[in-house]
Image: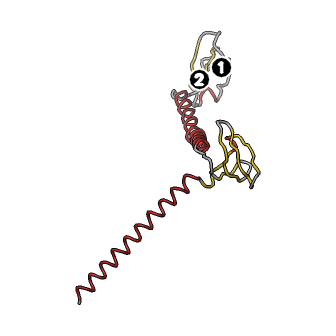
Amino acid sequence: MPVSAAWVTPTRLAAVRTEDKTSPAGTAFVSAGPTGRSTDVQLAASSSGGSSWSLLFMMALIFGAMYFLMIRPQQRRRRAVESMQSAIGVGDEIVTVGGLYGTVVDIDDETVTLEVSPGVENRYARAAIGRVVTSAAVDEDDEVDEDADDVEDVEDVVDETTDAVKAKNAKD
């Protein structure tokens, strides 16, 4: 019988001879080897030992990327909206998620009453508030800050004028 080319040519698969005819699955039976007797050959595919660890590492990496790119930013936005909705006060001008502009007239735990035009009031859920356009507390603080800036400007002008008068008197 002629010798098969597969038997002589080395391959990347390991060939293991076994004498037992009850071999496990994946065993190739060769009817006649170079010696002329019947043997079975078990082919073992070469596999890397760290494949299970690399798979677990990749899954953890994908979960971490999803957390930092999707879940965490959404949580930050939700917290910011909740804090904005809880900080609303009477007199604030707001916009609802539907695009309606109004001024806050009354606030409950669950609802907000808006004046959308003179004499017209609508009641909305707090969650329906999209953003605050102007805050009544901020407007009062801005006026105080502007007054303080005006006082500082006047003091600077007085100091400059006093210095100019002193310099003029020193020349004379």
**Residue 106 is at least partly visible in this image:** yes
Q: Is residue 56 above or below residue 78?
A: above
Q: Is residue 105 above or below residue 110?
A: below
What is the image's colouring? secondary structure
Q: Position of residue 35 (x, y in %)?
A: 60, 17
Kindly give the residue lying farthest to the bottom in the view shown: 172
- Of residues 168 and 124, the one nearer the viewer is 168
Cα–Cα gap, marks 2 and 1: 8 Å
Residue found at x 58% / y 31%: 11
Q: Position of residue 125 (x, y in %)?
A: 70, 40
Crowding at dot 1, Cα within 10 Å, few <14 / some 14-19 / many 20+, comes out as few
- Of residues 170 and 34, the one nearer the viewer is 170
In the image, 139: left or right of 155? right
Q: Amino acid at mark 1?
A: Gly
Kindly give the residue lying farthest to the front in the view shown: 119
Q: How many marks?
A: 2
Name the residue carrying label 1.
26
Contact, CB < 8 Å: mark 2 with mark 1? yes
Q: Considering the numbered disc 1 on the image, is that residue within a helix, a strand or a loop?
A: loop
Q: Is residue 152 above or below residue 141?
A: below
Residue found at x 55% / y 34%: 58
Q: Position of residue 91 (x, y in %)?
A: 62, 51
Name the residue carrying label 2.
44
Q: Considering the numbered disc 2 on the image, is that residue within a helix, a strand or a loop?
A: strand
- Of the numbered discs 2 and 1, the one sitting upstream in the chain is 1
- Of residues 1 and 115, the one nearer the viewer is 115
Q: Position of residue 109 (x, y in %)?
A: 64, 36
